[in-house]
Image (cartoon, grey):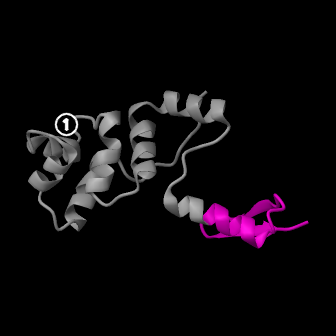
Amino acid sequence: MTRSHPRTTTVAEFIADKLAESDRTQREVAEQCGFENPNVITMFKTGATKLPLNRVGQLAKALNADPAHLLRLVMLEYAPETWEAIETNLKSTVLTANELDLVHAYRQVTGDSDATPVVIDRGAVLAIVVA
C-alpha cells in the first residue's frame, strides 16, 4: 500500500518557481545542464515532459536548489511506488541539506541519546523529549 505524502508543489511548479527566482535565462540553465535545446526547460516547467532522473542533480545545481529535494519531488510524482519501496527497503530516506542540519541539531540537543521526538501540533511545533 502506498503511503500518503502531502504534496504542495509539482515538479513543474518547483522548476517554474526556481526559474522565476533565478537571474539566469532558460538558455543558460539548459546549457549548464547539457541540453542542446533550451525548449526542454520550458517543457519541464510546464509539465509537458518529465525530468530524467539522470538530470536531477544538474538541473538542481543550475537552479540553485537542493538536489535531494528535487529528487524526492521527482520520485514522489513520477514513481511513488518505487520511492516507497526504496525508503522501505533502506529504512531511511534521502535528506535535504536543511533536513540534515535539523538531524545534526537534534543529535546535539539530545546529546546523541536517541531521544523520542513528540509532535505537539503537526502544523507548528516539534518537541524533543529527553528521557
Q: Which residues are magenta?
A: 102-131
The residue positioned 18% from the left and 42% from the top of the image is 34
Q: Total marks drawn? A: 1
Residue 13 visible (yes or no) = no
Q: Is residue 107 magenta?
A: yes
For the N terminus, the quadrant is top right
- Relative to 55, residue 130 above or below: below
- Asked which quadrant contains residue 48, the reply is top left
Which residue is drawn at the image coordinates 43% and 30% (left, top)? Answer: 79
Q: Nearer the viewer, residue 122 or 36?
A: 36
> Which residue is the site of mark 1?
48
Q: Indicate the quadrant containing the C terminus: top left, top right, bottom left or bottom right.
A: bottom right
In this rendering, position of residue 88 left or right of residue 4? right
- The quarter of the picture where residue 46 lies is top left
- In the rendering, at what x and y percent does residue 37 appear? 8, 40
| Position of residue 105 measured from the top left corner of the image (x, y, whole percent) | 67, 69
* Foreground of the two, 12 or 104: 104
Residue 128 magenta-highlighted: yes
- Amino acid beneath label 1: Ala
Looking at the image, residue 125 sits to the left or right of residue 51; the answer is right
Circle 1 packing at 10 Å, graded few (<14), some (14-19), many (20+), is: few
State the residue at coordinates (77%, 62%): 118
Give the x, y percent position of residue 108.
Answer: 73, 70
Q: Secondary structure at mark 1?
A: loop
Q: Residue furthest right?
A: 131
Query: Is residue 36 depicted above or below 85 in this figure?
Result: below
Classify residue 9 as left or right of residue 21.
Answer: right
Q: Is residue 19 above or below residue 53?
A: below
How far across and how far down the image is residue 117, in percent? 76, 61
Regarding residue 78, the answer to whether it shows in the image is: yes
